[in-house]
Image: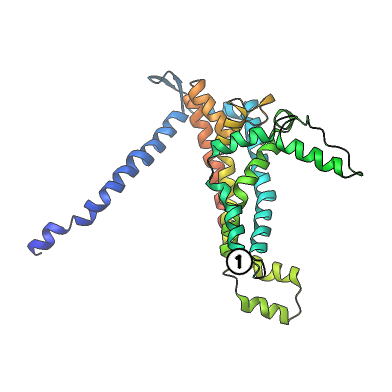
Amino acid sequence: MSSRSRYTWWAPYFFIAPFVLLFLVFTVYPLIYSVVMAVKQYNGLQVSVFVGLENFFNLAEDLEFRKALRNTFVFAAGSLFIQLPCSLGLAMLLNRPDIRARGFFRMIFFAPVLVGLAFVAVMFGLIFEKNTGLLNVLLHDLTAAIPLLPTWDKEFPWLQEYVMPALILAAFWMYIGFNMVYFLAALQNVSKDLIEAAMVDGANAWHRFLNVTIPAIWPVATFVFLLSFIGSMQLFELPFLLLGPGGGPDKQGLTVVMYLFDQGFNVGRFGYAGAIGWVLAMILFCFAMLQKFLARRGEA
């Protein structure tokens, strides 16, 4: 071994050392410590007692956790089955070559994602207000102008009795353009030759969509599906700022992460909060495996 190679063999390790160090300190150590916390019961930060899986068993009987989990899944269903199809439809519309100013409209629909969540929460808090809220006023004026429709009540209680639809609407406004960009990129890579061949064979627009477009964009679609589900299960800032720490009346907007935050930082049950975090992690892992399975089936 030459003197130069003897003194430079460590160079690659030197350059990756900062990443490895940060990864160990900020990822591996917190991950391992969260497992330790999940099997303990804490009385303050210094005093703890090993309780095994008791925290997880208590979660199974916790009605408030069940409600938070149900609320989170309802929000996720709204994101997956309302927001994503609309994002795909919007992407297909803006992918048409005969649409003028396509770049301008793409920017307009994408712009909400650039706005901070705090601003969105304040804005939709005003939009959903009773009597003076923009949404109630617009619906009232619109229905009043159409004789066959009943007039919308300006006192409609969005943030009092219809919390989850309000959250789904707010997230819809913010993220429809974000998901549209993914679908738009996928649609632009669909082979035009396949579409033209399908047209020659007599396939109508619906059949071309099902048999050409969907298989072509399937990998991106499953990725966006997973991304939306993960984001929905981690929902915290929007309901926290819009409804407060308790999730609104009767905890209708309480999510899993909000409940984790409450148990860990307000109540001081750090072990219980750790168990909630691991239950959430297992849900996301199972869904990621499902997404991987669906992606492989789509490629087959």
Please name whichever residue, 192 or 50, is drawn nearer the observer in this view of the structure.
192
Query: Is there any visible trace of residue 236 in the rendered image?
Result: no
Query: Residue sitting at 67 percent across and 45 percent down?
Result: 77
Please name whichever residue, 295 or 120, is drawn nearer the observer in this view of the structure.
120
Q: Quadrant of residue 11?
A: bottom left
Toward the left, the furthest residue is 3
The residue at which mark 1 appears reads as 187
- Where disc 1 sits, the SS reads helix
Q: Position of residue 259 (x, y in %)?
A: 57, 29
Looking at the rendered image, the quarter that the C terminus falls into is bottom right
User: Callout 1: few (<14), some (14-19), or many (20+) C-alpha neighbours within 10 Å?
Assistant: some
Q: Position of residue 134 (x, y in %)?
A: 71, 37
Query: Residue sitting at 15 percent across and 58 percent down?
Result: 8
* Render colour scheme: rainbow
Q: Position of residue 99 (x, y in %)?
A: 66, 66
The number of callouts visible is: 1
Please name whichever residue, 276 or 256, is drawn nearer the observer in this view of the structure.
256
Amino acid at dot 1:
Leu
Q: Position of residue 221 (x, y in %)?
A: 60, 59
Query: Residue sitting at 7 percent across and 61 percent down?
Result: 3
